[in-house]
Image (tube, grey):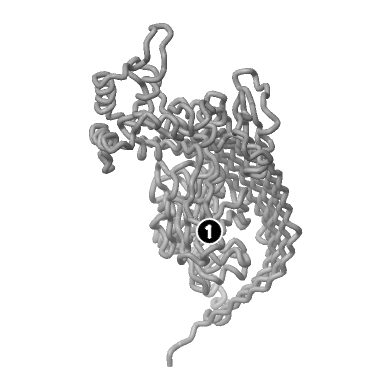
């Protein structure tokens, strides 16, 4: 009996001792960087199944024993172990994980460990390449990834740089990489060849596939650099794959983030180039005149500058003053030429502006363990570096992620962008297959003009009026031409995407990804009746000009007939519309298993259906009178002239048929010990 009483007393003492050692602890989990509370962080006791999560303010309460070790973890942060000793209140700081993103390679089909990925790849965080003032993600990659070469061939918004991964893989074929955004291939609206990238053709305004992506919505970029990517994306991946992963919502109370930047671009200066000033240029012209190269016959040439203006004034009678515009005397000619020798026109100052480009993005991220949301709205305003450029872009990104339980999760995403852009009027470049020389008619690119035009020419005469010289047999003033010859571009790009994930059993996962995308662009090239291009088709001042003017119509059935004007009034109204409708549906099953912490097997079995419908419609309107409300006046022979010269207008519809692909990709990795 006494023995039982003693045993009961000992058990009671042990229980009381243990009870006295167990106590409640309160704590708070904070972000080590900004001291913000971390809600829904996991707090567990090491080697014990019990635990809790923090509330919206990062607070928690838990029953613990003395010297217990707390394990605190949260997605995106380093897991931390804390020995509480006898404390009853603790503050725990979690640092953001620096290894989590780098340890995973995103292929668009799978997220693989970098240690088990057998291909060549590089991961870049968006924060590492974010360059204020740069709006195209493709240009931000310059110098950020080994083996990736970026060559900027144009600063115009929407044009694509030359991107080469591991160098050029083809002489005549495509060399550009494949873009993949959130697992879906980003199809090109128009196909821009290698030659067109640097051509300055209007088509290049749609050359960049990623011009509609807001760089502030990007989380990471993975560049797959070797041929292993062709196993996933086919032959199009032979030039490399750039995989973009956009941002998702994060657990916690709503976080509002604003990003804004202002970029000042100054005008170019002639001091940056080795170009003659107006006095030097006029000395060259004087030498040419002494050698008989600049005579009065120059007025009949296709182009004539200062001497053409002088001889035209000498031959033009002013009815109001009853005299010629310029006396044909040595003194009058000398004074006229000396005015231009002192002009030293700064074309960069006239054609460029000290503009301020601004970009703003407002995003909201929030969520819990069951659902997360991310919403962003972006606005870009670029008043243009030149007097003829202007861009406005609006972007929107809305994404919801849901986790029903530990096995099933799904997400929905809607992305859209609208772009409104103005650019100088431009025609497509033509090439001579015999000589290999490329040329463009009616080129009014402001930079090319400022760089290649004589500084002795003037935009305004001594009376403040615009001064014209002869180009394409018609009067030309660059400021007048930019006012009357321009391109207006409107692009709308919408995409809806859904994803479903099901963890069937441990190691076996099913994934469904589907997306539909709609892109529509309309390009309007307005060439007014007062433009040099329109007037070139009416230049027929004398028989010499009529015979040499290639823009007139010559009847092929009558070789002796003089060329005639077939555009008596009006200008041109050229339109080009591009439509892209495509959808991508993918089902895949992946399996992963690790043995003895040394051997790992990964396999992916999937099926994919893709469909793309591209339509291109172009039209040329002749004799369009902008000053007369859009009425049309033309000679029917202009259709015959353009049909003979250029083949007329065109309408192209290209529909890619169904493409169903079944693929099986095994990955095996093992770790061996050296004996």
- Quarter of the N terminus within the rendering: bottom right
Task: Identify which residue is drawn at 57% across, 31% down.
Answer: 537
Quadrant of residue 296 within the rendered picture: top left
- Could you say which is closer to the camera, residue 660 or residue 299? 299
Task: Identify which residue is drawn at 63% across, 18% down.
Answer: 628
Side of 142 where 269 appears, left or right? left
On the image, the x and y values in percent for residue 625 come to 62, 22
On the image, the x and y values in percent for residue 352 come to 38, 32
Most distant residue in the bottom direction: 675
- Rendered position, 109 above or below 344: below
- Rendered position, 247 above or below 575: below
**Residue 22: in sight, yes or no?**
no
Most distant residue in the front direction: 560
Task: Identify which residue is drawn at 36% across, 36% down.
Answer: 453
Q: Mark 1: give few (<14), some (14-19) or many (20+) Cα within 10 Å.
A: many
On the image, the x and y values in percent for residue 23 come to 47, 56
**Residue 395: in sight, yes or no?**
yes
Quadrant of residue 326 within the rendered picture: top left
Q: Quick one: SS at disc 1?
A: loop
The residue tagged 1 is: 176
- Quarter of the C terminus within the rendering: bottom left
């Amino acid at each position: 009996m006494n023995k039982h009483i003693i045993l009961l007393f000992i058990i009671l003492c042990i229980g009381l001792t243990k009870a006295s050692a167990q106590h409640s602890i309160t704590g708070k989990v904070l972000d080590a960087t900004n001291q913000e509370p971390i809600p829904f962080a996991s707090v567990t006791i090491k080697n014990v199944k019990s635990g809790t999560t923090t509330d919206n303010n990062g607070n928690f309460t838990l029953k613990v024993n003395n010297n217990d070790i707390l394990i605190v973890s949260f997605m995106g942060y380093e897991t931390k172990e804390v020995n509480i000793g006898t404390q009853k209140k603790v503050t725990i700081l979690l640092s953001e994980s620096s290894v989590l993103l780098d340890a995973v390679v995103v292929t668009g089909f799978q997220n693989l460990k970098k240690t088990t990925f057998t291909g060549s790849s590089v991961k870049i965080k968006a924060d590492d390449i974010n360059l204020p003032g740069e709006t195209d993600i493709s240009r931000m990659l310059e110098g950020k990834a080994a083996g990736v070469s970026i060559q900027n061939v144009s600063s115009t918004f929407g044009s694509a740089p030359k991107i080469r991964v591991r160098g050029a893989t083809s002489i005549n074929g495509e060399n550009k990489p494949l873009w993949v955004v959130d697992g879906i291939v980003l199809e090109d609206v128009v196909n821009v060849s290698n030659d067109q990238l640097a051509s300055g053709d209007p088509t290049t305004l749609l050359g960049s596939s990623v011009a509609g992506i807001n760089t502030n919505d990007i989380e990471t970029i993975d560049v797959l650099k070797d041929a292993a990517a062709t196993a996933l994306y086919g032959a199009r991946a032979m030039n490399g794959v750039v995989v973009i992963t956009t941002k998702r919502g994060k657990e916690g109370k709503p976080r509002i983030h604003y990003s804004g930047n202002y970029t000042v671009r100054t005008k170019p200066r002639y001091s940056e180039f080795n170009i003659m000033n107006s006095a030097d240029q006029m000395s060259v012209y004087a030498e040419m005149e002494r050698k008989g190269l600049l005579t009065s016959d120059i007025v009949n040439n296709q182009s004539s500058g200062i001497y053409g203006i002088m001889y035209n004034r000498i031959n033009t009678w002013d009815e109001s003053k009853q005299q010629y515009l310029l006396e044909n005397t040595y003194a009058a000619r000398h004074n006229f030429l000396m005015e231009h020798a002192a002009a030293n026109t700064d074309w960069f100052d006239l054609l460029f502006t000290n503009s301020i480009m601004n970009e703003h993005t407002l995003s909201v991220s929030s969520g819990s363990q069951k659902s997360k949301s991310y919403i962003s709205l972006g606005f870009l305003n670029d008043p243009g570096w030149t007097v003829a450029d202007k861009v406005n872009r609006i972007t929107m990104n809305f994404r919801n992620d849901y986790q029903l339980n530990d096995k099933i999760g799904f997400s929905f995403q809607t992305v859209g962008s609208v772009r409104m852009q103005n650019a100088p009027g431009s025609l497509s470049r033509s090439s001579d297959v015999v000589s290999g020389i490329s040329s463009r008619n009616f080129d009014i690119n402001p930079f090319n003009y400022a760089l290649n035009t004589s500084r002795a020419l003037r935009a305004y005469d001594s009376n403040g009026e615009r001064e014209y010289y002869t180009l394409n047999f018609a009067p030309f003033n660059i400021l007048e031409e930019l006012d009357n010859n321009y391109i207006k571009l409107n692009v709308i790009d919408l995409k809806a995407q859904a994803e479903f994930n099901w963890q069937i059993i441990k190691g076996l996962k099913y994934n469904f990804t589907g997306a539909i995308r709609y892109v529509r662009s309309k390009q309007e090239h307005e060439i007014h009746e007062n433009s040099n291009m329109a007037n070139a088709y009416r230049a027929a001042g004398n028989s010499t000009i009529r015979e040499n003017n290639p823009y007139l119509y010559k009847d092929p059935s009558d070789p002796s007939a003089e060329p005639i004007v077939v555009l008596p009034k009006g200008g041109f109204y050229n339109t080009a519309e591009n439509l892209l409708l495509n959808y991508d549906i993918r089902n895949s099953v992946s399996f992963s298993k690790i043995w003895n912490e040394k051997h790992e097997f990964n396999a992916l079995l999937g099926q994919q259906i893709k469909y793309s419908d591209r339509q291109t419609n172009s039209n040329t309107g002749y004799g369009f009178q902008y000053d007369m409300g859009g009425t049309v006046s033309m000679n029917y022979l202009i259709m015959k002239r353009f049909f003979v010269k250029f083949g007329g207008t065109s309408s192209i519809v290209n529909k890619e048929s169904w493409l169903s692909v079944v693929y099986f990709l095994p990955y095996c990795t093992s770790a061996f010990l050296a004996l």
